[in-house]
Image (cartoon, helix red, strand yellow):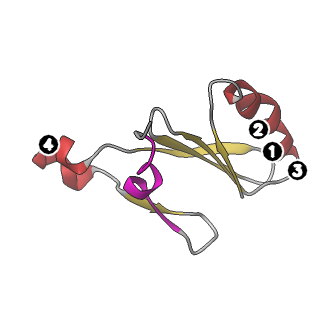
């Protein structure tokens, strides 16, 4: 599993060159994390190529209308590790300057 935290300077390299290298070498799970936009793209390897599994976007629960809260994902598990990621925890320090 590889997790890349994107920055404006390296995002293009992470999305192209590194993406292809990890894909060619059979990395099972590849995450692209955008701390500025507060989302995580999860790619899973299907044996021959990466496929986008899901994009998890963080939005503070208090900013979500009550009727939409049940449909939102606030945490997710990795595909093969016993690891749960809480989106609020993942982006806790991104607004600090």
Q: Residues within 10 Å of mark 3 (few under 14, many from 20)?
A: few
Q: Nearer the viewer, mark 1 or mark 4?
A: 4
Q: Residue furthest front?
A: 97
Residue at 80% over, 45% down: 23
Q: Position of residue 91 (x, y in %)?
A: 44, 48
Q: Are marks 1 and 4 in contact (CB under 8 Å)?
A: no
Which stretch appears magenta?
84-94
Q: Earlier in the sequence, mark 3 or mark 2?
A: 2
Q: Residue 38, labelled with which disc?
A: none
Q: Secondary structure at mark 3?
A: loop
Q: Nearer the viewer, residue 72 or 32?
A: 32
Q: Secondary structure at mark 2?
A: helix
Q: Residue 19, labelled with which disc?
A: 2
What residue does disc 4 label? 65
Q: Earlier in the sequence, mark 2 or mark 4?
A: 2
Q: Cα distance, mark 2 to mark 4?
A: 36 Å
* Residue 5 found in image quarter: top right
Q: Are marks 2 and 4 in contact (CB under 8 Å)?
A: no
What residue does disc 1 label? 23
């Amino acid at each position: 599993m590889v997790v890349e935290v994107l920055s404006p300077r390296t995002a293009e390299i992470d999305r192209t060159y590194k993406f292809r290298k990890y894909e060619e070498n059979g990395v099972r799970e590849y995450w692209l994390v955008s701390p500025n936009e507060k989302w995580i793209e999860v790619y899973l390897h299907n044996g021959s190529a990466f496929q986008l599994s899901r994009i998890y976007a963080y939005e503070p629960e208090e900013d979500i209308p009550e009727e939409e809260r049940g449909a939102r994902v606030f945490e997710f598990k990795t595909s093969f590790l016993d690891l749960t990621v809480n989106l609020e925890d993942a982006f806790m320090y991104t607004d600090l300057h």
